[in-house]
Amino acid sequence: MGLHGINRGRKVLVEVTVLVQYVMVRFGSRMAVDGGHRDGGCDWDGRWNHVTKFLERPGPFTHPDFEPSTESLQFLLETCTVLVIGAGGLGCELLKDLALSGFRLIHVVDMDTIDLSNLNRQFLFRPKDVGRPKAEVAADFINSRIPGCKVVPYPLQQQFLQLKKKNPYFHIIVCGLDSIIARRWMNGMLISLLSYEDGVLDPSSIIPLIDGGTEGFKGNARVVLPGMTACIDCTLELYPPQINFPMCTIASMPRLPEHCIEYARILQWPKDKPFGGNLDGDNPEHIQWVFERAQERAAQFNITGVTYRLTQGVVKRIIPAVASTNAVIAAACATEVFKIATSAYIPLNNYLVFNDVDGLYTYTFEAERKENCSACSQVPQDLQFPSSAKLQDVLEYLTENASLQMKSPAITTTLEGKNKTLYLQSVKSIEERTRPNLCKTLKELGLSDGQELAVADVTTPQTVLFKLNFTT
Ligand SMILES: [Zn+2]
């Protein structure tokens, strides 16, 4: 190992120590509160043997400051409250893993209802549950199967928002979501809960976020300590916008079965208009037509692997869900929740990738905080535009910039002491009224150098402040 490697290793070690100390500070006092008896009602002898082995005896891999005691388990069973976001593929696994590890006070949020196609992997659901809310069915299943468990479901957004008003306390939040927007929103919510005193972060205001994600045979698990380690938005560039194949590849040099399907979908369908109208991904005849054209194309280029199923997947942009990937990633996330809640082991620092597309590959690295992260940096965001740029240009920048990736930003500012909406998409009447502003230049809109723009978007619960800097 070269000097560089050694130094880097030391840096990581130092940061991990900070992290563990933080965990100790945060949970140490809480754990000391209760202690002693275990609930005799459902905790039969030896029930938690698999957990106490980690918590009640020393071991070669524990953190040096860890002291074995019976209090850690008490904390898991009686005090530690975990919020699980998502009760789908990852969520079912997470709930099962957490409940069997001794977590009993679990809240689960999911707005979705159960679909027949979920049943192959979302194992808390049965055919009779199709159409019912995922959160409710998952909570019922865990509560009836695992004695003493108290899972509270939030099947509707409304209920969850009310919950926020009541300000309950969650020790740890785990996300098992397929939506980047929802992840970013949650991330922003936890950042908004941080409190600073004279610019110094109060560690007791930090709620750790464990985030898992899967896509086919690939997955990742990460630990975010908001305000301390890289947040979701710090590494937004890791989530590229939807993959599109370059048109030249599709048109002239296909290599993959997907290229052939895209050729049929993008180029042949609009030319031939086989059924008159637009391609409908839910119409089997349409899929069949694309499938057959893609097969012809594949034959010309000696490409194998075009199937009806793949055609359907490409046309509807379905990424196959793989049960084993969900199991691996959920297990990694649940382990991190356990490590943080008990401080028995050093938490993941801080981003694990998993890939078993071809063989099996896994790797952990330390994602770094982005100095000017729009979510967690507290640094005002700069917008560099000439005064002759149009508002449309600013809007495009906000949605297309890889580290912002906003969805439908609403831009407001203060002009002559009055709040003015420059553009807002989500309300039809306001959109129509503000649309003419898009074609106006920043100067024509009366904006000046150094002007502050407040931008609201679905990707964050808080507005983001931008400072407009005119370039010449
Ligand atoms: Zn950040």
Image (spheres, grey):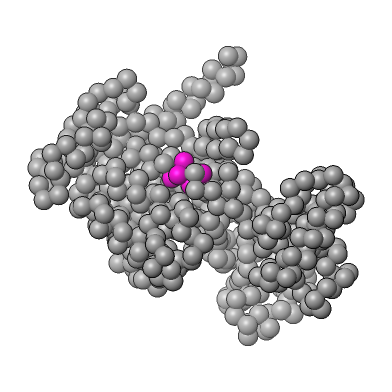
Q: Is residue 77 left or right of residue 205?
A: left
Quarter of the image that includes the C terminus: bottom right
Pick the front one: 256 or 215: 256
Q: Between 191 and 358, which is closer to the camera in this rendering?
A: 358
Query: Could one spot residue 373 in this view of the protein?
Result: no
Name which residue lies at 63% across and 68% down: 408
Residue 179, by quadrant, is: bottom right
Q: Main secondary structure of the magenta part?
A: helix
The vertical placement of 430 against 211, above or below, is below
> Between residues 364 and 385, which one lies in front from this camera angle?
364
Residue 458 vertical placement versus 8 (above, below): below
Image height check: is 285 above or below 247?
Answer: below
The quarter holding residue 6 reads top right
Residue at (58, 14) in percent of width and height:
1
- Taking the magenta stretch, the answer to whether it contains residue 470 is no
Image location (x, y in percent) of residue 186: 46, 57
Magenta region, residue range: 325-330
- Judge left or right: residue 67 versus residue 83: left
